[in-house]
């Protein structure tokens, strides 16, 4: 068996194509969806991520801007920058690029983003709505994973899904999305005893532990859908996922690569969330 590779770039293009008519309808009504990124410091990696998000926005016809602040800015200056964007009607989505410098309370900053503009879905109220089964703005990476599974036609109802990773950004919200679709979900982490006993029973396996090549082919159930959320910089400078791609592809039915998999989908769903936020804000103003 050789796994079908889930091409995140190709699926992302489909997402963008599906957004074109919605963006056109907004622009016909005088609304150009806008995404603002707050970037603190000059981390090369963060700058690359921000440029990728800007390009994706422009591809679909969104307005994208970056509010840059020096690495030594105070927390109060950062909060003031976020508040200025909260009250800017031309901006429909706001993200604060992580990580933030030491000494700044990341949670305080993230929770200061206006609820309706929280396109990363990190506000506790948005996460709570997901827990209650009434999602509003959902974290982008879990949303991207679900879109990949749907694209592959993978049934979830009655299946066993195992999520490795318990973060509020990926693991927990993804588990909730899978539960809502009727899957039986087990949440593990890199320290779970006998991790392989869980992964070998998974019809759907999502790995978001931040540990390079944590999951190997002998830990995968034959024919399973394996989604690799991890992205790790190796000593030789190359990128590797949390799944050993070469050994897993001989066992899995579907497998996402790193790079070129979930990362592309995360950006696509950020754009989709921004369009959704613009639609809702536009409707609220017209009500």
Image (cartoon, grey):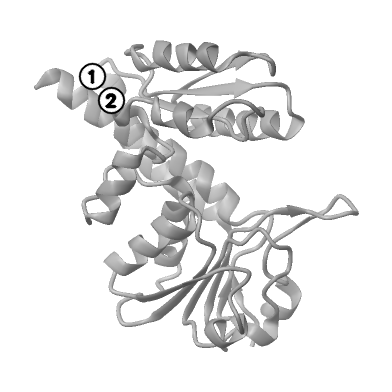
Residue 29's tag is: 1
In the drawing, does residue 122 fall left or right of residue 45? left
Q: Which residue is at a point 73% across and 28% down the rendered structure image?
A: 43
Residue at image x 45%, y 69%? 152
Numbered label tally: 2
Q: Residue furthest front?
A: 103
- 75 and 156: which one is in front? 75
For mark 1, does the 10 Å Cα neighbourhood hold few (<14), some (14 to 19), or many (20 or more) residues? few
In the figure, 129 relative to 273: above or below?
below
Q: Quadrant of residue 26?
A: top left
Mark 2 sits on what residue?
26
Quarter residue 277 falls in: top left
Q: Quadrant of the C terminus?
A: top left
Q: Quadrant of the N terminus?
A: bottom right
Residue 72: x %, y % from top left:
69, 15
Q: Position of residue 167 (x, y in %)?
A: 50, 54
Mark yes or no: residue 251 visible: no
Separation of marks 1 and 2 at Cα, in angstroms: 5 Å
Nearer to us in this view, 37 or 16: 37
Which disc number belongs to residue 237? none
């Amino acid at each position: 068996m050789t796994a079908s590779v889930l091409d995140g770039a190709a699926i992302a293009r489909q997402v963008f194509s599906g957004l074109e008519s919605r963006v056109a309808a907004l622009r016909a009504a005088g609304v150009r969806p806008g995404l603002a990124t707050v970037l603190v410091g000059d981390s090369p990696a963060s700058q690359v991520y921000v440029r990728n998000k800007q390009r994706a926005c422009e591809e679909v016809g969104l307005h994208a801007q970056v509010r840059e602040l020096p690495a030594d800015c105070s927390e109060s200056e950062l909060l003031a920058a976020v508040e200025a964007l909260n009250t800017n009607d031309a901006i429909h989505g706001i993200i604060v690029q992580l990580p933030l410098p030491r000494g700044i309370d990341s949670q305080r900053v993230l929770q200061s983003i206006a609820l309706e503009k929280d396109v990363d879905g990190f506000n506790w109220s948005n996460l709570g709505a997901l827990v209650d089964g009434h999602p509003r703005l959902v974290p982008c990476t879990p949303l991207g994973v679900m879109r990949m599974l749907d694209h592959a036609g993978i049934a979830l109802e009655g299946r066993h899904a195992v999520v490795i990773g318990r973060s509020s950004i990926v693991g927990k919200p993804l588990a909730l999305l899978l539960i809502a679709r009727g899957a039986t979900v087990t949440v593990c982490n890199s320290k779970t005893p006998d991790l392989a006993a869980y992964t070998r029973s998974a019809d759907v396996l999502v790995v978001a532990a931040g540990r390079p090549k944590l999951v190997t082919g002998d830990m995968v159930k034959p024919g399973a859908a394996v989604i690799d959320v991890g992205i790790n910089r190796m000593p030789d400078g190359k990128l590797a996922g949390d799944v050993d791609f070469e050994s897993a592809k001989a066992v899995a039915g579907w497998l996402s690569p790193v790079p070129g998999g979930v990362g592309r989908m995360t950006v696509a769903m950020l754009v989709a969330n921004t369009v959704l936020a613009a639609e809702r804000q536009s409707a609220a103003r017209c009500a």
